[in-house]
Amino acid sequence: MSARTAWSGIVRSPLGITALCLMTLVTLAAIFAPVIWGAQAELVNPAAISQGPSAAHLLGTDALGRDVLARVLVATRLSVVLAVIAVIIGVVAGTLLGTAPSVLPRWLGRPIVGFVNIAVAFPGLLLALFFAVIFGVGSTGAVLAIGFAMAPQFARLTQTLSAAIAGRDFIDAARVAGVSRFRILIRHILPNVGEPLIVNATVAAGSALLAFAGLSFLGLGVQVPEYDWGRLLGEGLNRIYLNPAAALGPAVAVVIAGLAFNLLGETAAAALGGRSGRRRHRLPAIALPGAAQPVSADDDAPVLLVDDLRVSFPTPSGWVTPVRGVSFTVSRGEAIGVVGESGSGKSLTALAAARLIERPGHVAAARLDFCGTPLLTTSDRAVRSLLGTSLAMVFQDPMTSFNPTRRIGSQLAEAASEHQDVTRKQAMDRAIERLQSVRVPAAARRARQYPHEFSGGMRQRAMIAMGLMNHPRLIIADEPTTALDVTVQRQVLQLLAGVRRDTDAAILLISHDIAVVAQTCDRVLVMYAGRIVEDLPAATLHTGARHPYTRALLEVVPELDADRSEPLKMIPGRPPAPSAFPAGCAYAARCPLATELCRETDPELVADTEGHRVACWHPVSGEAAVPVTIATSAEIVTAAEIATAAEIVTAAEIATAAEAAPTMDEEETVRR
Amino acid sequence: MASTTATQAILIRSARSDNPWVSFLVRRGGQFLLSVWVLVTAAFLMIHLVPGDPVRAALGMNAPVELVESRRIALGLDQPLLAQYLHYVGGLFTGDMGTSMITGQPVSEIIATRLPATLQLALLAVLLVLLVSIPLGVTMAVATRGGRRRGLELGFATGSVILAAIPEFLLAVGLVSVFAVSLGWFPVAGNTAPFSLVLPVVALAVGPIAVFSRIIRVEVLSVLGQDFIRTARAKRLAPRRIYTRHALPNAMTATLTLTGLLLTGMVAGTVLVENVFAWPGLGTMIVQSILTKDYSVVQGIVLVYGVAVLVVNLAIDVILALLDPRSTIREA
């Protein structure tokens, strides 16, 4: 079944078609050339010795006046056949060596594994020369030498592949059922490793061809009167002054045949690996950045002004827009929380506001101003200094967000030295001082340590300290406490609150935890399916929330004094994927108050007189309760998994869809 | 009581910080010694695995019986196998690698005269590969990240695949015919002028440059996708600084591993390229010795190549462990 997909994969790619054409050419030459040109290739002509290319002899003649082109064509058969035999020897010997340890008793198997590990470290040619000495100079010796030189590689490959298969459930099942090790190997393991083995053997045939050409060229392979490409190459090189074509002809033949095998193997491997089709979709043109003029902060403007922000990513099936029309304003010193389930677009909104969405992602907005500077229409270089000094980011996972190869201190210091006129010493002193201010003990010593030597909470505090290296007017904290344990969470939140108090910086706190946001922020934005559904003061969150979704979020927060034996509450259903947002209200499918109107028309985000914004056709008021499901703990696990899955789709898969696919393909190809 | 706990804590901490290194070095060093032993034994057995009498084969069918016999005795081939083995291994410790079966010259002397020329070729080629492929790979990664410049990416991929598919000795033949024969810019063969180095070094370097720059591109691309690069971008560092100070050091592990492979790959490369250019190095010597059945010389050169490979692998592993601040390699 998968063999068929592999073949259709080869036929579908241009590279695969090239490979097949080359392969057909080589095969035809191998079969028919000796029949057609055999006599001509042997025809000695003393009148035309070592001539250059002419109409009669396209590649000239050799030392006995024989036609070089005919000889190159005829040599195809011997060259290819010898290479294929060598690979068969290599595969058989390698498979035996590779599978023996799984059948033989341990004391015998382990030395074999060890031996293979040692042998595989030596270059193939060195092994081939070693075996060529033992088996003697000549065609047979060279075939055996190249075959055995390949064996360790194939042994290693078989070991790796069968180790992967042996770990699977059906092998365990067979073992438990009392199937013998030998039978497991024959019936279960070998059929499963066969396909990658064949693909690798195809690539290896290309290498064997080149290796054989090498040995024959050195005079260690095919001997007179027989001739293969390597032999012809050696003869041609000796008379390169008289007729360079006699050396280049066989060289080109070797390269073509080698390429045919290599490409065929590579494309088969790519097809087996499940290469996905790459399609390109176009988005409307992006507004071009204006001239590179340094911009400065406007003190009166709001710190961040976002109007109709949209973030899109290309996927194999077209563009998806996980953030669709988000508008809000952050004033000086204000703390705003953004809450929502995984995949609601809150993190992408934060990244877009910080101008950190990279291609192929696409950001569009009616306005996106930071301290009065339009971010979308100003060039990168012009806003670099403004953003570098006035905007600080704190990311979710402090483990992966620091560069593991550099010391904490220098990672902090460069934030200052990059944007301000300070010496390295001054920058480092400031880094230590900032580490102290976020209560990292022994800051001077800690600054010289690497990120892995810090605990999670300490890393996150160092990340905040990094944001304080300049003078931030806005700190965007994207789930800063999610990766931390509960006691550390509180410290980090207190630290952020303290920073805001001391520096008058505004804070945009992204979180899925409405309780965290309610404690820390002045205002709360509730996001659902790429939109803001409610925007209200944190103080009135518990009493004044009007959107059924906000109510449900508040309802499912477990109380500290809740009865542990009671099942947890949860919102039934799950948020829609960005590729399948409905026409009406995205929450309608989960909302107990939904009507036909909700399902057909998406409600606008409308503000009341007090600036409380809500997007709902049937806003709740007063003490009315919104029913939520009471779930068992098992269901909670499923719900959590679903949420995680949704997040992976939105954030990771979409963002990397265009880039990761070709990269991974290439990485696989290169490794070989 | 309190002091005992403190001492214990210190002991535990010191054990934890020392242990990975000690166990790493013991494990890796042991592996190295085991490999050397296997190599020496294989080299020793090589002469005995050759069908027939190696001395007779080396001196030819017409050589007088007395000469063959005396050479056998001189080489110690009349002794029991175990005695020969012990003598061979013992000799290696004093730098005695036996004598040529044909000329009677000490093998170590032959190797000493030939090794520098090979080393010169190999090291210059490796240097050229690193100097070209690292900047090229990083530049290509930066230029083509996030699906930018598809045309450039395709051209680079195609070009590097084709160049990588041409084995060094065929490339060498092509270079000779164009730059030495047709244009006459460089000598065709031998090591006569400083210019002589150019063609062999280029022939050795082109293929690896193609492979290397591709791998470095992929490596850098994957590093550019990491969280800490986003942090660096959030600090609004200049792009050049992001690439050189944040991305490149994280691609170092792969680069060093590749450099190891490159150095060991030079064994095969130099053997063939030396023969194209009649370069007076170990590669021409080993082929000539195989053809003349001078097995003790072959044995010695195989040993030199093999040990070189093992030493390079060991050195790379130790450097990787030293450079890795997380000590993942040492603990693995």
Image (cartoon, rainbow, N blue to C red):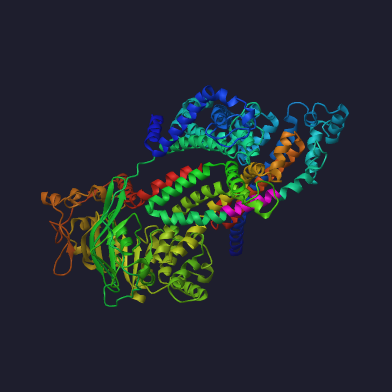
> What residue span does the magenta drawing correspond to?
B117-129
Which image quarter: residue A510? bottom left
Q: Considering depth in this image, is A377 or B329 the residue closer to the camera?
A: A377
- Residue B128 lies in the magenta stretch: yes
The percent position of residue B147, horizontal first and vertical second, equals 37, 52
Q: Farthest residue to the front: give it.
A: A47
Residue at the image position 39 percent from the left and 65 percent from the top: A492
Q: Position of residue B24 (x, y in %)?
A: 62, 50
Q: Is residue A161 visible?
A: no
The answer to whether residue A27 of the structure is visible from this angle is yes
Q: Residue at x 43, y 33 (%)?
A: A21
In reply to whether residue B294 is colored magenta, the answer given is: no
Q: Nearer the viewer, residue A73 or A621?
A: A73
- Residue A649 falls left or right of residue A50: left
Residue closer to the observer: A667 or B40: A667
Q: A462 or A190: which is nearer to us?
A: A190
Which percent across, then down, holds residue A418? 45, 71
Q: In which quarter of the image is residue A472?
A: bottom left
Left or right position of A602 against B237: left
A607 left or right, relative to A407 = left
Q: Position of residue B236 (x, y in %)?
A: 40, 66
Q: In which quarter of the image is the N terminus of chain A?
A: top left
State how many labels appear. Answer: 0
Determine the main secondary structure of the stretch shown in magenta: helix
Residue B323 as seen in the image, left or right of residue A648: right
Is the residue A178 above or below the residue A528 in the image?
above
In this rendering, the answer to whether A279 lies above or below A519 is above
